[in-house]
Image (cartoon, grey):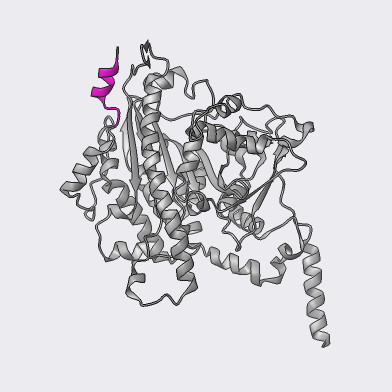
Amino acid sequence: MKTWDWAVVGLLACGLGACASLSAEPNRPLETAIHGPAYRITTIPDGTSKELFVALAFSGGGKRSSAFGYGVLTALREITVDFGNGRRRLTDEIDVVTGVSGGSFTASTFALKRDAMFDTYKDEFLKYDLNGEIFGIYLMPWRWDWLVNPNWGTNDEMARVYDELLFKGADYGDLAQLGRPFLGVQATDFANEEPFVFGQDTFDWICSDITTLPMARAVAASNGFPVLFTPISLRNYAHDDEHACKRPAWVDPYLAIPDELSRRRQLAMLASSYLDKRDEAYVHLLDGGVSDNLGLRGLMQMLAPTAEEATLDAESLNRLRHVVIVSVDGQAEPDRQMTDVPYLDSVFRVIGAVTSTAIDRYGFETLIHAREMTRRLAQGLARRDCPRGENGPTACRMIDDHFVHLSLSDIADDEGRSALAAIPTGLTISDEQVDALIAAGYDAALCDGDMRDFFKSLPNVQMPEMPKRCRTYRPWDVEAKASAPNSMTARESRADKP
């Protein structure tokens, strides 16, 4: 070997040795919150109007989904409502945002930066070349610490990148002090093959304090595409007698439910899988889209009744009039062009078709369940603390439910929409594609029929005009909507009132 070659090898070895001090900070045991309130939807400050409960779920789909979701937020920011306490933008009324994979960027940035997001997010993140960072991890020797350091993986390196771009060191304790909207970043647990939602209620299961966890690590976990990135791992302290955890009171009663298809029983079994004692315990997390690419399963898990006490205080419950859940779906459409070729000559096309088929079909079932859950949530809140009849509590207040699915299908089926749907799932897209997707998200939020019905139900609402490229709703679309499960309308609520 030439002297120059030996010198290069020596420099690389020194570089790797210098980097070997990198180590991802582990999640801490649950003892006392380091700063701020515990990060739960019921304990963080709430400055939203009591008449509304609004939750947005941002789907996976790389930068395509991030940009589309950002466009939806820009539309909601231009809509104002007045419940008697002054005019407020709808973006100021959002209680919960969940995000999975690419959607977690938009959800988490909005939860942290609020209105300031609209000054920088498009240019500093959506148009930033994240693929360049990925290539750098694998091709630049000074970033190869992950090759020799068991405490630092490729996704730990990406978490560092996300923190520099978006979060600037912010952790969940900072989020807790900011208050609503509550952020539910969703990853997938390798072992349980179930969504793992970053929040204190889930961290209770592993006896850990989420307030010290950097936001960037949650987002990295949600975007941890298998093989390309290493998992984000958490320590489960529930097995350690030194960190005695209080078992949630609802778990054992729910485990006793005899119906094996009960969702409450299933949730209790999931919690128990973390709480049961063992010698060592870790949680290894990968891309949230593996278990749910819509970000709705995590939202349903968060809103599921897991305690006997009410999730809303008496004042909020008495004034609540609307429960709104919006699925912001930036997923790609199926590859219809496969029917135009005699055989598939690309392994990547086959893999993409197989994975997207599973995700899309499972997503359709998730949408159906989410719509039903929205209706049941509104009905349950309408009956809470109300007089009991012969068959149990009856509704004594009016709470309307609205479930909305926003996607590119809300826009007229033209060449522009087809081009947007064909944008590949990745962490870098062109500036022109970013701008087009933002415009599409803006239009979809104003075009969707269910969304406009919700807008019109609000008092003193002011909103932009309907975009010209909205899809024309055909007569059979209206008939299908009329035959769908009805929301709890004012008429039905009054009929149930004693």
Does the rendering let one see residue 187? Answer: yes
Looking at the picture, how far across and down is residue 411, in whole percent? 27, 55
Residue at 50% x, 49% y: name it: 100
Q: Which residues are magenta?
A: 487-498
Looking at the image, residue 431 sits to the left or right of residue 23; the answer is left
Looking at the image, residue 403 sits to the left or right of residue 167; the answer is left
Looking at the image, residue 456 sits to the left or right of residue 23; the answer is left
Going by the picture, which residue comes out furthest to the bottom? 2
**Viewer-side residue, 37 vs 305:** 305
Q: Is residue 410 inside the magenta stretch?
A: no
Residue at 41% x, 44% y: name it: 366
Looking at the picture, how far across and down is residue 253, in whole percent? 57, 24
* Quadrant (top left, top right, bottom left, bottom right) of the C terminus: top left
* Quadrant of residue 432 within the rendered picture: bottom left
Looking at the picture, how far across and down is residue 82, in whole percent? 32, 30
Instruction: Look at the picture and state if 180 lies above or below 159.
Output: above
